[in-house]
Image: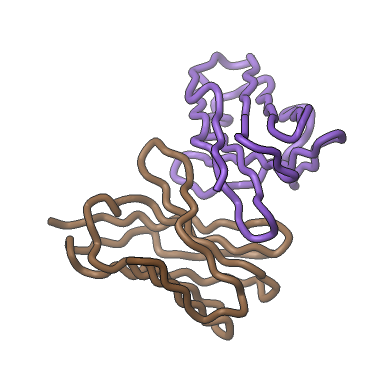
Chain colours: A purple, B brown
Amino acid sequence: SAVISQKPSRDICQRGTSLTIQCQVDSQVTMMFWYRQQPGQSLTLIATANQGSEATYESGFVIDKFPISRPNLTFSTLTVSNMSPEDSSIYLCSVARGTDTQYFGPGTRLTVL
Amino acid sequence: GEDVEQSLFLSVREGDSSVINCTYTDSSSTYLYWYKQEPGAGLQLLTYIFSNMDMKQDQRLTVLLNKKDKHLSLRIADTQTGDSAIYFCAERDDKIIFGKGTRLHILP
């Protein structure tokens, strides 16, 4: 398995501000991902965080809104920029181990007022 | 595009077996997963099955895969109050696609 921590665990933010979420893994991993889980919904992949290059974004998500950093093989950040109430969600970091398993962090619960 | 469907709710009496069903559309799926999410927590990988297997058993959990019908199920034997959670079915080809989750409610 993998031990994944996220900071902050939750936050309440004002409209128009930005929040950076940190994800730390207990060992080096090649693949790191960021997901969003809107209230009562399933998980949607935002992007794959690539070490040493730009993140790969899924359809409907753009770098200006969700900039991602991946400075090394154990750490990544996701920024939610210029927030609106529609960005209120749980944001989850995830890592892949090998080709078959994928583990998730505890999530960051974001509320935008 | 790919889609994963599962019923939203299931109520089961404590001690009975729970069966959570899931259907998917991607015939290229390599792995299929069951994740558990307890209130306020992240996702816990419960079990997974490779697409060339029919069944996998792990203690109280049994996963059945019917690849022809693209149907996956999770059976939890002797359901306990601690099993109360949302269970997500997911399939993987190049990326993981999740269902909307089944909320399992345990009746006393």
Residue at image coords 57%, 43%: A2
Residue B51 vertical position relative to residue A107 in the rendered view, above or below: below
Residue lying at the far left of the rendered structure: B108
Q: Where on the picture, by quarter, is residue B17? A: bottom left
* Vertical placement of residue A63 versus B106, above or below: above
Q: Residue furthest right?
A: A53
Name the spot of residue A100 as percent of width and height, x first.
64, 60
The correct choice, above or below, for A84 with respect to B35 in the image is: above
Left or right: residue B99 compared with residue A93 = left
Q: Mark yes or no: residue B66 visible.
A: yes
Give me the residue at 48% from left, 46% from top.
B43
The answer to whether residue A60 is visible is no
B3 vs A73, nearest the viewer: A73
Query: Image quarter for residue A71?
Result: top right
Residue sitting at x 74%, y 35%: A73
Total marks placed: 0
Tell me where residue A110 appears, x and y as whole percent.
51, 26
| Vertical relation: A105 (above or below) B56 | above
Of residues B14 and A103, the one nearer the viewer is: A103
**A49 on left or right of A103:** right
Q: Position of residue A77 (x, y in %)?
A: 68, 27
The residue under the point 49% across, 47% down is A41
Q: Residue furthest bottom?
A: B68
